[in-house]
Structure formats: C-alpha cells, structure tokens
C-alpha cells in the first residue's frame, strides 16, 4: 500500500516536471520571434531589446530554464506584461471564481447523473431507459459555447429569470454551472448505467435478492455502492474536461475566473500570464488525478489487498 | 430503432460531407454584404436570415461546414498516423523507448481538455493551419495510448511469436501481423476523435483563436451571434443546431461501431 502510494506520487512528480517544461518550451515553439509577435512588427529595436531582457529571452535556454524552475519553487511566476502586476497575485484573485464554478458544475453533474443512470440501469430497455440515453447523448454532443448562449437566450433574455453574465450572487452562478455540468452529467450517467448493470449481474446481488431483500435495498445499498468505484475514477479523469470547459464557459458568461484571464492574456499577447495559467490548471489536474487514484485504493479493499500481497 | 441508429446519423454525415465537398460548386455568396438586410430574420430571400454584416447565414454555414470538415479530416488523419506509429513503436520495441514514450504520453494527458490546444493556437496566432497543428498536437496522444495497449497484447500472441521464430523482419511483422489487428479499435477511436475535433475547432474559433474573418467557422458565427441574441437569435440557433447535429451523428455512429467491434459491450451497453 505504502509502496503503491509512493510510486504514484513519484510518477505524479515526474509528470508535473514534464508539464512545467512543456509549458516553458511553448513560448519557444512560437514560429518566429516571440518578442516580435508580442510587440508587433513596427516596434522600436530598443523596446524589443528591453522586452527580451525583461523576459530573460536574451539568456541561454539552459539559464532560462533554471530561472524558470527556480521561480516556480518560490511560487514566483513572474510579472504580467500588460498590468505589470505579479502573476501569482492575479491568479489568486481569479481562482475562487473558477473553483466555485467547477464545484457547482460537479454537484449539478452528480445530482443529475446518479438518479438518471441508476434509473436507466434498473429499468433497462424501457422507454425511460431510452429517454435517459437520448438525453445523455445530447448532453455529450452539445458544446459549452452553444449551450451557454442557448440558456442565456431562454432563461435570461426570454424569461428574465436569471442574469445574463457576471458574478453577483447565487443567481448568476446557476447558468454557468449548468452549462459546464451538463456534459459531465451526461458522461457520468452513461458510466453509472454501465457499471450498475454489470454490478447487478454479480453473485452477491443474487444472494442479496435470494435472502429476500427488497429491490430498493439491493440496488441502493448493495449494487450502487460498488458500482460507484469506477465512476469515481471517471470523475477524476473528467475533471480535465471540466477545467478545459470552464475556460469556454467563463468566456460565455464573463465569469471572472482563470479561464477568462487565460483568454484575455492570449488576446493581449501577455505570454507569461498565459504560461502561468496553463501551468496552474494542468498541475491542479495532475494533483486531483493522483488523489483520485489514491482514494480509489483506499475505497476498494480488493485493490488494497491485491497490492499488499 | 435501426433506422434511428444508422439511417439518421448517416444522412446527417452525408449532408455535412456534401456541404463540404460541393459547397464551392453551389451558387453561394458567403461574403456578399446586403446592408439593408443586416440581422434580418429567416425569410423568403434567405431561408436562415442574415448575419450582423448583412451576409446570408445559410451560405456562411455551408462555408463553415467546409472548414470544420477539413480541419476534422486533417487532424484525425495526422493524429491517427503519428499516434499509432509512436504507440506501436513503443510497445513493440519495449524497454527504455517504451518508458520514455509512456512518460511523454502521461505528460500530454496531464493537460486538461483543449487547454493545450488553446495555448498553442493562442501562441502561434490564428488561422486554419495553426488550428490543425494545435489540435493534432493534442490529438495524437489518444491514438498512441490505444495503439500501445493493443500492440502490447498482440505481440504476445502465437502468430507473432511464430513469425519471429521464422525470422521475418520486424518491420514486416508489425505491418503485416500486428497493425491489422489493432485497426478496429483505432477506427472507433478515430470516429469519436472526429466529434471531438469538430467541437474543438468550433470552440477555438468561438474564442477568436481559429479561422479569421471573413472566412467562416460555425464557432465564429456563434460568437458573432451572441452579441445580437435578443434581436437575431437565428444567428446563434442555426450554427449551433447544425454543429450539434453533426457531433451527435458522429457520436451515434461511433457508439454503433464500438458495439459492433467490441463483443463485450454488446451485453452491457
């Protein structure tokens, strides 16, 4: 168990270092001179030299890489070219909004997916099952940047129930969270249905039924609890899609989070901010996935026992 | 049910293909500006109405279909070839090579969703070429992981051992005896990849990182439309509906293909 945890943490560390390096080299992948792209072609040579120096691009790549990692270790992410403010500070300001949105979307997704998937499995091949599967297929196929405007059109512009955009109070959270949570709900409900169907075929479910337990108890206490384990792994993996989707969703609703900061920085060619945002979002994702893996081992005694032997 | 599962998605896909392939042959005026018709609702002269510059929306959607189709085609072909090659070499050669490849795959998988594509498209600047490069950079990973897993199991099989024992060259073994067996799952992966790329391309264009005006993408049409939703909802509804139908059709066919290829899911899903 301990050895598994250590090796999992070690490989997460390798991935985090790799991700950081890739993000570092992204700016060098830009065809041509990044400084020229940032300043435009008409920039004065003196300005270019100044910016190149400010970004440390006039140093050898090895030195740049060292300075970059050295900065990361001290949580120093550099300074925004646009606002001249420390990037770490800017990101800390934006983080609560993104977290709030992600957690709300996650809650919505689980609240929809569990009952929908479970009902679909228990009433397999009925009209209800087919309906639920069509809904989840629609949920997977509808992109955030269309669902968002669609919800705004219906609930804000036509019905006038909820605000169009911004982040002021609970009512402004509903539409962005629903937009972001729908696709996840669709994927999860398909997963819940599939794993629950598999679980319902297990011997211990037959035993539970044979000893006269009610269908409700069998499904809820015996089957669903075991069916949820793989769902948790999928949830961890889908968090990446959630974070990626948050970028688009934040743009649709002018939600002042990290995604909006990233896109604004891209349009302003504020590359240090872009790098820092990508890095923070990716590292968060790696950490959550590692935690999911560890939680899985802790939750499933079979995996634990297997690892010990 | 069979008609729903196959006929409908196939006809949607054929329509998409037709719009992409024969769009240039049609009498379309996607860039023609009719100042008196700005934001006009669907009517007799243009059945989907006009956009914010007074251009006929249907004509622009057809051009957008071409954008999304060719981006999807290029990205999936490049990703599948590169990813399969890398994954196959890793699994077949094994050892240190495989180790390095697995690490690289892990690192690329650590970027959530289309984040890396957004970053790359943003850094390289807008344009269809850059969209294709950015999405392929992200896309190969799925194929590499799948191909690696497939080849790892196939290379243990008796017919491969027999070929090795007979002294067949490795390149020939891989091409003749290993790769054909990995094709089915890779084709399923490719079909879902098409859906992902169509959404991703539209998403990048929605964020202003994809094709540039006056070229049309469904994503950029939706973005322009969001500013005029109250007066001209057709500008958001029409491109979004067509985008969703295409993605839905691809997903349905992907599901169908997977059930057909994978006997195990026939029972469960």
Image (spheres, coloured by chain):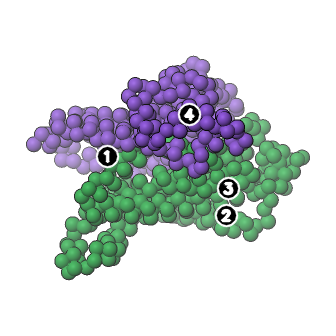
Chain colours: A purple, B green
Residue at 75% over, 38% down: B228
Q: Residue furthest left?
A: A309
Same chain under badges 2 and 3? The reply is yes
- Report if the CB atoms under discs 1 and 4 are less than 8 Å apart: no
Residue A21, picture quadrant: top left
Residue at 56% over, 59% down: B72
- Report if the CB atoms under discs 3 and 4 are less than 8 Å apart: no
A306 horizontally vs A194: left or right = left
Between B170 and A2, the residue placed more toward the observer is B170
Residue at 40% over, 36% down: A66
Q: Which is more N-terminal, label 4 or label 1?
A: 4
Residue with the mark numbered 2: B19
**Mark 1 element type:** helix
Give me the chain letter of mark 4. Answer: A
Same chain under badges 4 and 2? The reply is no
Q: Is residue A148 visible?
A: no
**Mark 4 element type:** helix
Front of the two marks 2 and 1:
2
- Report if the CB atoms under discs 3 and 1 are less than 8 Å apart: no
Residue with the mark numbered 3: B64
Between A306 and A197, the residue placed more toward the observer is A306
Residue A156, picture quadrant: top right
Residue with the mark numbered 1: A195
Quadrant including the C terminus of chain B? bottom left
Examine the rendered structure and indicate whether residue B268 appears above or below residue A289. Answer: below
Cα separation between marks 2 and 3: 9 Å
């Amino acid at each position: 168990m301990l050895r598994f945890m250590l090796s999992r943490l070690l490989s997460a560390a390798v991935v985090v270092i790799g991700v950081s390096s890739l993000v570092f080299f992204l700016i060098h992948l830009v065809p041509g001179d990044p400084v020229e792209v940032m300043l435009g072609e008409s920039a004065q040579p003196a300005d270019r030299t100044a910016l190149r120096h400010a970004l440390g691009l006039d140093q050898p790549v090895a030195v740049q890489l060292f300075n970059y990692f050295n900065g990361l270790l001290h949580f120093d992410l550099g300074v925004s070219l646009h606002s001249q403010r420390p990037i770490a500070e800017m990101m800390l300001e934006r983080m609560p909004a993104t977290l709030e949105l992600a957690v709300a979307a996650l809650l919505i997704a689980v609240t929809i997916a569990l009952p929908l998937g479970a009902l679909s499995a228990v009433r397999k091949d009925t009209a209800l099952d087919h309906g639920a599967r069509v809904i989840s297929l629609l949920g997977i196929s509808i992109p955030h940047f269309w669902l968002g405007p669609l919800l705004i059109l219906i609930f804000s512009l036509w019905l006038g129930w909820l605000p169009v955009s911004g982040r002021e109070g609970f009512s402004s959270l509903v539409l962005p969270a629903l937009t972001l949570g729908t696709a996840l709900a669709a994927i999860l409900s398909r997963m819940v249905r599939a794993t629950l169907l598999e679980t319902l075929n297990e011997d211990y479910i037959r035993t539970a039924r044979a000893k006269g337990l009610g269908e409700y108890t069998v499904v809820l206490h015996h089957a669903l609890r075991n069916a949820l384990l793989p769902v948790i792994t999928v949830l961890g993996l889908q968090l990446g899609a959630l974070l990626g989707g948050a970028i688009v969703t934040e743009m649709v609703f002018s939600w002042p989070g990290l995604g909006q900061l990233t896109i604004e920085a891209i349009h302003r060619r504020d590359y240090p901010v872009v790098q820092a945002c990508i890095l923070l979002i990716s590292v968060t994702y790696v950490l959550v996935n590692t935690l999911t893996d560890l939680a899985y081992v802790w939750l499933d005694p079979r995996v634990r026992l297997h690892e010990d032997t | 049910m069979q008609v729903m599962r196959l006929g409908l998605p196939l006809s949607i896909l054929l329509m998409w293909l037709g719009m992409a392939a024969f769009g240039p042959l049609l009498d379309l005026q996607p860039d023609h500006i009719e100042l008196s018709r700005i934001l006009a609702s669907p009517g007799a002269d243009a059945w989907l109405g006009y956009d914010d510059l007074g251009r006929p929306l249907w004509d622009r959607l057809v051009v957008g279909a071409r954008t999304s189709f060719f981006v999807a085609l290029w990205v999936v072909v490049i990703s599948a070839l590169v990813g399969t090659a890398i994954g196959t070499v890793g699994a077949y050669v094994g050892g240190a090579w495989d180790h390095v490849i697995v690490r690289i795959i892990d690192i690329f998988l650590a970027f959530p969703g289309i984040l890396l594509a957004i970053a790359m498209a943003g850094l390289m600047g807008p344009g269809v070429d850059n969209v294709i490069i950015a999405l392929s950079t992200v896309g190969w990973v799925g194929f590499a992981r799948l191909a690696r897993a497939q080849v790892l199991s196939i290379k243990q099989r008796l017919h491969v051992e027999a070929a090795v024992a007979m002294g067949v060259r490795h390149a020939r073994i891989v091409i003749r005896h290993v790769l054909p067996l990995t094709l089915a799952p890779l084709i399923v992966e490719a079909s879902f990849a098409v859906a992902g790329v169509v959404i991703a391309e539209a998403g990048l264009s929605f964020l202003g990182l994809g094709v540039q005006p006056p070229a049309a993408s469904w994503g950029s049409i939706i973005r322009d439309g969001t500013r005029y939703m109250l007066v001209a909802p057709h500008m958001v509804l029409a491109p979004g509906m067509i985008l969703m139908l295409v993605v839905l059709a691809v997903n349905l066919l992907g599901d169908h293909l997977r059930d057909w290829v994978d006997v195990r899911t026939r029972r469960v899903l």
